[in-house]
Image (cartoon, grey):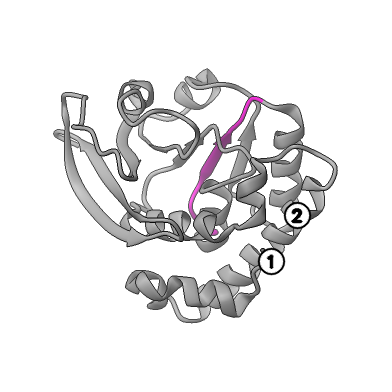
Amino acid sequence: MKLNSTQIKELSSQFPMILDQGDLLDAGIDRIVKYLELRTQWAKIHNLSGPQALQDCRNDVLDSFALYSVLRQDIPLVDVGTGSGVPGMILACLCPELEIFLVEPLVKRTAFLNTCAHQLGLKQVKVFRDRWPCPSVIQGYSQLQLVSRAVISPEVWPALADTVSTVVIYQYLAMHRPEWGLDGFDMKGELSYDSTEANRLIRRWERLGF
């Protein structure tokens, strides 16, 4: 399903913080449209994501809008196992001043992400062909916030995200909503929203004392 700027703006209707951006939102949506077009072009040749995700990208946009709504924009964001760039690349389209690191182990996907960042003028985006934990990112920054929409179970993600530099962890939850399994963090933000399939939840956890 191809999305145009009007359809993407309609998807933002359940996220008041995004609607408040005015002209900045319009510019961000234009970049999102171009990103999705690039992804469609590359996906005809390369395996960038699961076939279902590419057929209907509305959830990619909705999950990214939800993250934006609870996002701290004063700390670099790391998207672990970003795949074709969700949510990190869409966040970069909306937040061109926020430093964003996309961590992805597959060569073709990192080539696509670098192409997107260049063609969209997203100079704040850095792509790392690696698995998490990624020393190149961790050693270079004393404070990081982490998100992942990759195929990682909700129980495993908090411990995987926790490093010496991690001060904020974002957690996507669908029907299965386990207890938070990591000591030393407190929930500072939460948003419930509707995807195309079911109600979803995103939470922001911050390290105690941060």
The spot of residue 154 in percent (x, y) is 33, 31
Q: Is residue 122 above or below residue 206?
A: below
Task: Specify start and end residues of the magenta stretch as a single range.
Answer: 96-105
Instruction: Point out the image quarter for the C terminus.
Output: top left
N-terminal of the two: label 1 or label 2? 1
Give the number of marks.
Answer: 2
Disc number at residue 2? 1
- Give the amino acid type for the residue marked by disc 1 in the picture: Lys
Residue depicted at 64% across the width and 43% down the height: 84
Q: Are marks 1 and 2 in contact (CB under 8 Å)?
A: yes
Q: Is residue 51 above or below residue 12?
A: above
Q: Residue 101's quadrant in the figure? A: top right
Q: Quadrant of residue 126?
A: top right
Amino acid on which the number 2 mark rests in the picture: Thr
The location of residue 26, given as percent across then percent down, is: 56, 77
How packed is label 2: few (under 14 Cα within 10 Å), some, or many (20 or more)?
Answer: some
Q: Which residue is mark 2?
A: 40
Q: Is residue 181 visible?
A: yes
Q: Measure the C-alpha gap from mark 1 to mark 2.
A: 9 Å
